[in-house]
Amino acid sequence: MATSLSLYVHIPWCVKKCPYCDFNSHALSADGGLDPDLAETYVNQLITDLHADLEDFGLSRRIHSIFIGGGTPSLLPARSLDRLFKAINAVAPIEADAEITLEANPNSADQSRLRGYRQAGVNRLSLGVQSFDDRSLTHLGRLHDSAEAKRAIDAARAAGFSNINIDLMFGLPHQTLPMALADLDQALDFSPEQLSWYQLTIEPNTVFFNRPPHQPSHDALADISSAGRALLEQPGFDRYEVSAFAKPGRECRHNLHYWQFDDYLGIGAGAHGKVSDHEFIQRTQKTRAPGDYLTAPNRQIRTVSGHDLVTEYLLSALRLRRGFTLAHFEKKTRQSASQLRPALERCEQLTLLTLRNEHVLLTEFGYDHLDSLLAQLTEY
């Protein structure tokens, strides 16, 4: 169905597991470094993993985008990434203008390292700043302070990156509205191409779940969210996805690929993928534990069709501010959009969305009540 293919690469290690993190990340030993031999062994397995996916799914497509996430991918040496990219290109040609993103933490993002990543082919950097307030960073268990975060952003520009995303969170322990807006102001001072701004949520299997921090009230969170969006609109940022803002034309292409329900492979410990196959899709997940991934890798495949396929499509498409067309819905799900019309009309009456010329477009109210909107649309 889709002609382009994206690739997600998971690097599962970090120096220290943050108390809010429920991602597949594993703390390294006390010295905090990634052993070079382990890095090379892991890259070998990534290459084997990719070969297996391409062969088993019969895929021969060009790579539209690559996203290297974690964990802390910036622990990986640049030479390892260079070798990985060359191996990828040998079996699935990387498009000349492909977006290649690396997530990096400020404490492992010095200019020399970043220049190595840029030379290897990384052309978009996503920096996990989370806050510019030192007290908030301490509450979050981050290893960097505000000064180090600012140095990392400057270092990224000096290393040649012209496409930078800054990750920030709000709803932090003891955070006030002025503190949240100060974080945004300081990020905007660096004129990033994108800014991810998402609410801290307490997830199971995290330190914060067992020992919940004191967060702003529901009303305070609503005020922060509203004021923050208004602030970001002033310098010309578009809210193109639930928690993502970008300058016009600078949206993250890899994430758009996800939310438009296009296909992607996931390689690495715990990585997820999605491959379309006529009237259904196949979801893949790789072995989660890094040690098991290296010694006895496994791939679980889950087939999604029918009502579940419609639900998954809506979960993705509704994240985008641009919404979706009914023609796109039918193309991606191979199901008639007529089944959705009664629910769409009901949601339009509730001012959650508008339906014009076969295009479903969310209202601001609908965007802020996505759970309710999704529940309405999947009741057919």
Image (tube, rainbow, N blue to C red):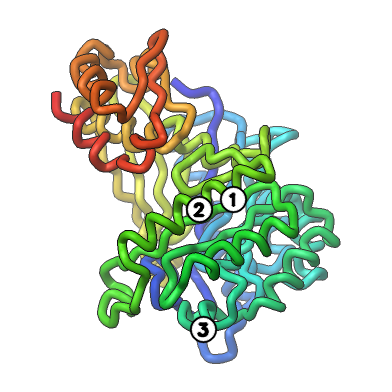
Above or below 354: residue 66: below
Q: Which residue is mark 2?
A: 227
Q: In which quadrant is the N terminus drawn?
A: top left
Q: Are marks 3 and 1 in contact (CB under 8 Å)?
A: no
Left or right of 31 on screen, residue 378: left
Separation of marks 2 and 1 at Cα, in angstroms: 6 Å
Q: Which residue is mark 3?
A: 138
Q: Quadrant of residue 189?
A: bottom right
Name the residue at 61% across, 35% down.
63
Amino acid type at image mark 1: Leu
Crowd around label 3: few <14 · some 14–19 · many ≥20 (10 Å) = few
Above or below 163: residue 152: below
Q: Which residue is mark 1?
A: 231
Residue 362: percent from left, percent from top:
39, 29
**At numbered mark 1, what does the secondary structure look like: helix, strand or loop?**
helix
Which of the two labelled residues, at mark 3 and mark 1, occupies the earlier sequence position?
Answer: 3
Residue 53: percent from left, percent from top:
45, 42
Q: Are marks 2 and 1 in contact (CB under 8 Å)?
A: yes
Left or right of 207 on screen, residue 35: right
**At numbered mark 3, what does the secondary structure look like: helix, strand or loop?**
helix
